[in-house]
Image (tube, rainbow, N blue to C red):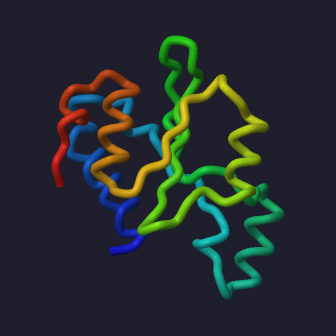
């Protein structure tokens, strides 16, 4: 398994419930540098289009209570958020909810907690 595998699992889990909870369709990944390693032409194009180092991996664009959305940073193993990712969190601030997740299931449950979707709160792969 890898961070990529866990994030792909998250979106597979969300797809299971999308028909019942259509808002899940709008949850999206934000590509970052890890997707472009070694492909300098693609990296340059992505930077020109607004790729920003440190932006978190997944965004839930739904306002809940006093939060205007949820950012999720996927990590694997013993990895922690980078300095750039911490800087992004600090700069964007408390208007958003924030979760660091190590598995697709954990991320799905965090989304379930945030959105109040019981099916996701107890999700198993």
Q: Residue at x 24, y 33 (%)?
A: 121
Q: Residue furthest bottom?
A: 38
Indicate left or right for 93 with 105 as reference: right
Q: Residue at x 57, y 13 (%)?
A: 66
* Residue 44 x, y percent position in the rendering: 80, 74
Q: Quadrant of the C terminus?
A: bottom left
Q: Residue at x 74, y 56 (%)?
A: 84
Q: Residue furthest top?
A: 65
Q: Residue furthest front?
A: 78
Q: Residue at x 19, y 42 (%)?
A: 123
* Residue 78 x, y percent position in the rendering: 47, 67
- When the figure is inspected, residue 12 is found, relative to residue 88, above or below; the finding is below
Indicate left or right for 52 with 116 as reference: right
Q: Quadrant of the N terminus?
A: bottom left
Residue 88 quadrant: top right
- When the figure is inspected, residue 38 is found, relative to residue 85, above or below; the finding is below
* Residue 9 x, y percent position in the rendering: 30, 59
- When the figure is inspected, residue 44 is found, relative to residue 75, above or below; the finding is below
Residue 109 quadrant: top left
* Residue 115 x, y percent position in the rendering: 37, 25
């Amino acid at each position: 398994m890898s961070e990529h595998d866990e994030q792909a699992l998250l979106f597979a889990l969300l797809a299971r419930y999308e028909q019942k909870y259509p808002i899940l369709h709008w949850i999206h990944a934000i590509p970052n540098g890890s997707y472009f390693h070694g492909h300098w032409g693609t990296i340059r194009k992505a930077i020109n289009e607004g790729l920003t180092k440190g932006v978190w991996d997944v965004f839930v664009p739904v306002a809940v209570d006093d939060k205007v959305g949820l950012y999720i940073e996927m990590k694997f193993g013993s990895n922690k958020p980078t300095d750039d990712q911490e800087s992004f969190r600090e700069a964007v601030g408390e208007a958003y909810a924030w979760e660091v997740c190590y598995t697709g299931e954990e991320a799905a449950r965090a989304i379930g907690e945030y959105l109040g979707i019981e099916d996701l709160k107890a999700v198993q792969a």
